[in-house]
Amino acid sequence: MSDIELLSVIERYLNGEMSADERARFEMLRHDNPTVDSRVIEHQQFTERLKQYGERVEFEGMLNAIHNEIDVQALKDEFVHHPSPIVRIWRNHHSKISLAASVAIFAALSTLFFAGLLKTQNQQSEVVALSSKVNRVESANAKLKIQTDKLITIVGASKIDQSKYTPSGTGFAISSDGYIVTALHVINGADSVTIQNSNGDAYHVKAVYADPGSDIAVLKIVDPSFKSLGALPYGFKKSKADLGEDVFTVGYPLDDMVYDKGYLSSFTGSNGDSLRYRVAIKASFGNSGSPLLDERGNIIGIINSKQAQAPDGPAFAVKSKYLYRALAAMSADTANKKVSLASKSVLANMSRTQQIKRLQNYIFNVKVNN
Amino acid sequence: MSKHISISAPTDNEAILGILNNSESMLKRIYIAYFPMVLQLVISNNGSDDDAKDIYQEAIIVLYNKVKAGNFELSSKLKTYIYSVCRRLWLKRLSQMSRYGGDIHDIQEYLPVNEDDLLSHEEKDIQFNKMEGALSVLGEPCKTIIEDFYIHNRSMQEICEKFGYTNADNAKTQKYKCLQRLKKLFFQQ
């Protein structure tokens, strides 16, 4: 029996076109022959599928016919125009509007950011170093070593040609035997450095240690003419200063020494930075490296930066405890002898003018030759 | 029946009875009664009126299959059922088109949809599309012969005359050959 003949028989069987006799015989065959049985089932299912397909096509035809009788536009107008146009726009486009709004906000914020108007954005970038020449603090020690070598060659000629040097900041003595501290950015990138106090005493110095993390540089007087600075009048505070404490500074924002006073306004610098104090004091370029003293003549910090875009804004001073740390690291890392900072100030009970007179010769204008 | 009455929504019991009796007029009443609701749903949620038509017709088919299979229990209002199915179908369509913003603006209360109903509907949909595809590539005269005989229940005599076959046996052989090709095409997909 060919496939087509079988199909014909199956169809007659399923359609009930067989005689009772024929039907019985076919059912026997179906019973005995699983292949025939499965063909019967398959044909039945497939024709059923075809029927369902046909019904669905017909049903969809009916649905479409009904649909075409509906005035969809009128329905749309009926409920679409009820809410106000703004509500409608919002309903239809709220995701797009939200996206557009966020893009707009982002654009506005980034514009503000790049225009530098967003103060909270990155306070670090707002803080400008108070050096006349601010350079990146990078591979500082390596550079300083090169400078040291160069400086040593100059040592022979003890007369300093001041015209070759430009004022860059302020430094102050930390020991009587010629160790000076300043802000690292004051001398960074300089080929040679000299210092000069208010008496006009000028010395060649070499950088002996740098701590980029706290922007501290330690210099040492290398002039053959140098003997000793004498006992330092001020002490160095190891503990934390007091909030609201009156403070003052003496430095070289100009060619001549400048005094200013203020108060300690916060234990943290910009953006929660715990390295520095925030100080309400007038500071200008050139004050970088100036000592910050309390009323009793103890150095509590080293001024190194100020708030940008605020001429009278706060200045920031590296806390003196980081100077202690830098010196401890210096003696550990280099061949330099350990510098012990005096903790006792002799300025304690003096008037401010007396204090300044006593300390002025220990504060230097730091000049660099690039 | 005046137009006004035919537009009024049938009661739910009327509607179910009408579906079971294959009443065309009832289908029309149901269709007209609930389409505006679905149109509003779809249009308020990033869709067009064509989308609404597709979704709504699918939901009507789901409803019909369920009622006819005898497992439709009127536990909620018919209106709520249709809305819920449409809502579910539209959400799915939106996510397929990546147009779904995460919230849907509802205009009606709704119930969770029995996923089995939708699954069996999807299964039927797949079969339907396969059959449609197989028939479309079957070609003439096979397509018409198959449709006339198996779907429209025409007799072989009518088909013979329509296609000018001289003898009914030739026509029958042709029909079976067509059917075998159709099966092959259908199961190949």
Image: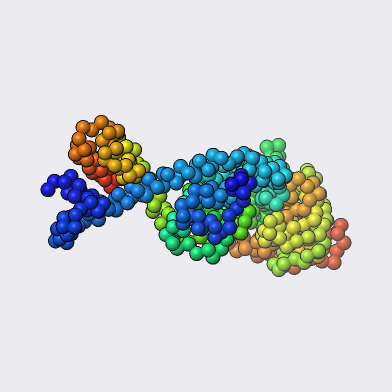
Is residue A232 found left or right of A353 in the rendered image?
A: left
- The quadrant holding residue A103 is top right
> Which residue occupies 77% across, 66% down?
A242
User: Is residue A237 or residue A222 the one in the foreground?
Assistant: A237
Instruction: Find residue B143 and report its image quarter.
Output: top left
Judge whether residue A234 can be spotted in this image.
no
Structure colour scheme = rainbow
Residue B168 in percent (x, y) is at 21, 38
Foreground residue, B35 or A111?
A: B35
Please report the residue visible at 16 percent of the width from the left and 55 percent of the height from the top: A22
Q: Please provide percent x and percent y for residue B23.
A: 49, 51
Residue drawn where x is 82% and y is 62% of the image: A246
Q: Residue furthest top?
A: B164
Q: Quadrant of residue B116?
A: bottom left
Visible residue check, residue A126: yes
Given residues A100 and B83, the one toward you in this image is B83
Compared to residue B135, the image places residue A247 above or below, namely below
Residue A366 relative to residue A48: left or right: right
Q: Considering the image in quadrants, where does the C terminus of chain A appear?
A: top right
- Residue at the farthest left position: A1
Answer with left or right where residue A245 lies relative to residue A17: right
> What residue is at 46 percent from the left and 42 percent from the top?
A61
